[in-house]
Image (cartoon, grey):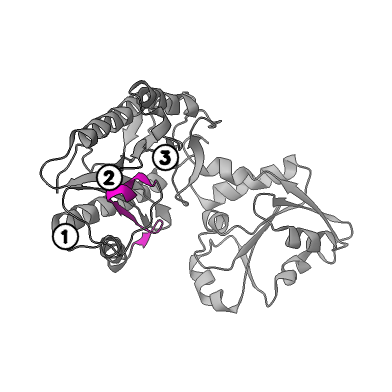
């Protein structure tokens, strides 16, 4: 598994074994990222039921044509008018059907309704799909790389065309998203553009304000290629003469990134990698100014496992893709964050996907 299950078929077979191991009859999946991961469907309404020997896909009339094109051929596609019809496939069974569902993803309301069905015995489980998603195969890593290359191309373009004193934060964010979309890419998340003191807010929203000269500019952005995300942050100095405070925290943040990336290899605890960057920033006197986790997994969602943080439980394994993104945030001045995408290759070594320079750029 550490190299990532190669196909939807393999992923579904893995879950069918899980059904047997749990002495159950079927598994209900309603979480759209998992529906996509297991079937290829990209619409906004789709459900799966996997039994020990069959695979069902359910959607409504709007997606009748799309599902035929996208959903893997081994699924039986069923068009339904209302949600409850999904479970009609079990109505005529002689004994109660033991149905597993992902406890992380089913609302209490739906759970209550399923419990009322006399022919079902519903059981919540911690979803194994989250676990298998952590390990990307070669094809998945290539998609993430394509998303990242597009992000780098777009960042280079917008930085070159930026006009201090004229370009607004909102305009810059909109331009980034437009450049993604016009080439058929989607956005991983609303683009974050923060200048001046606002760059000290780790999740600042772009404002309708002009990006001035002699200020910090932080850009956090990502694109999506065929369902797979990228994520990157770079911090710039707008102007010719960055002040000492900025040069200092930029250098510390950069060194923290490099030290963490150097320490990544298979078998290492995720929280150890976090501690390397965190302790270094603390040694330099800015421990209180770095309050978030060092990184997170990236794949069919922009935030997924593993968690590279003090709470990270995983050991790093081949096929894992995640960010390394330390930051130092000074409320009265501004912040610096540098974020790379990294994966662990077949030799168990860290491979940095991000190619955009980490050295300080003056705009």
Q: Is residue 142 left or right of residue 60?
A: left
Q: CA distance from mark 2 to mark 1?
A: 20 Å
In percent of width and height, residue 253 lies at 30, 32
Tell me the magenta residue range.
Answer: 185-201
Up the image or down, 225 lies above or below 242; here it is below
Up the image or down, 205 lies above or below 318; here it is below
Q: Nearer the viewer, mark 2 or mark 3?
A: 2
Q: Is residue 107 left or right of residue 160?
A: right
Up the image or down, 145 lies above or below 183; here it is above
Quarter of the figure with residue 334: top left
**Residue drawn at (67%, 75%), measured in percent from left and top?**
80
Where is mark 2, residue-wise? 234
In-front residue for pair 325/106: 325
Q: Is residue 203 left or right of residue 100?
A: left
- N-terminal-most mark, 2 or 3: 2
At mark 2, the secondary structure is strand
Q: Nearer the viewer, mark 2 or mark 1?
A: 1
**Residue drawn at (53%, 32%), measured in percent from left and top?**
312
Q: Which residue sits furthest front? A: 332
At mark 3, the secondary structure is strand
At mark 1, the secondary structure is loop
Quick check: marks 2 and 3 in contact, CB under 8 Å? no
Quick check: marks 1 and 3 in contact, CB under 8 Å? no
Can you tell which mark lies on residue 321? 3
Q: Residues within 10 Å of mark 2 (few under 14, many from 20)?
A: many
In percent of width and height, residue 115 lies at 83, 59
In percent of width and height, residue 275 lies at 44, 25
In this rendering, does residue 342 appear at all? yes
Q: Residues within 10 Å of mark 1 (few under 14, many from 20)?
A: few
Q: CA distance from mark 2 to mark 3?
A: 19 Å
Can you tell which mark lies on residue 165? 1
In percent of width and height, residue 291 lies at 45, 36
């Amino acid at each position: 598994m550490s190299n990532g299950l190669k196909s939807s078929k393999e992923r579904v077979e893995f879950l069918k074994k899980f059904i047997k191991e749990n002495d159950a009859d079927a598994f209900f999946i309603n979480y759209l990222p998992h529906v996509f991961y297991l079937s290829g469907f990209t619409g906004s309404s789709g459900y799966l039921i996997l039994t020990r020997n069959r695979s069902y896909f359910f959607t409504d009339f709007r997606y009748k044509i799309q599902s035929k094109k996208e959903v893997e051929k081994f699924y039986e596609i069923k068009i339904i008018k209302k949600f409850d019809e999904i479970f009609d496939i079990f109505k005529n069974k002689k004994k109660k059907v033991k149905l597993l569902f992902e406890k992380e993803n089913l609302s209490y309301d739906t759970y209550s309704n399923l419990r009322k069905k006399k022919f079902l015995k519903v059981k919540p489980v911690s979803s194994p799909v989250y676990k298998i998603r952590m390990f990307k195969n070669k094809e998945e890593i290539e998609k993430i790389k394509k998303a990242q290359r597009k992000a780098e191309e777009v960042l280079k373009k917008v930085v070159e065309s930026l006009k201090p004193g004229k370009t607004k934060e909102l305009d810059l964010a909109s331009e980034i998203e437009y450049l993604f979309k016009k080439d058929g890419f989607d956005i991983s998340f609303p683009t974050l553009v923060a200048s001046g003191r606002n760059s000290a807010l780790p999740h600042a929203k772009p404002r309708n304000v002009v990006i001035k000269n002699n200020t910090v500019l932080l850009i956090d952005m990502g694109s999506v290629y065929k369902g797979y995300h990228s994520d990157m942050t770079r911090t710039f100095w707008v102007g010719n003469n960055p002040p000492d405070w900025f040069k200092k925290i930029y250098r510390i943040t950069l060194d923290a990134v490099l030290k963490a990336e150097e320490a990544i290899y298979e078998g290492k605890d995720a929280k150890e990698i976090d501690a390397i960057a965190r302790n270094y920033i603390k040694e330099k006197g800015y421990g209180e100014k770095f309050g978030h986790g060092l990184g997170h997994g990236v794949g069919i969602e922009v935030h997924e496992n593993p968690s590279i943080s003090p709470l990270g439980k995983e050991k790093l394994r081949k096929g894992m893709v995640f960010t390394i993104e330390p930051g130092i945030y000074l409320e009265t001045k501004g912040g610096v964050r540098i974020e790379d995408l990294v994966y662990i290759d077949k030799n168990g070594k860290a491979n940095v996907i991000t190619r955009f320079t980490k050295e300080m750029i003056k705009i």
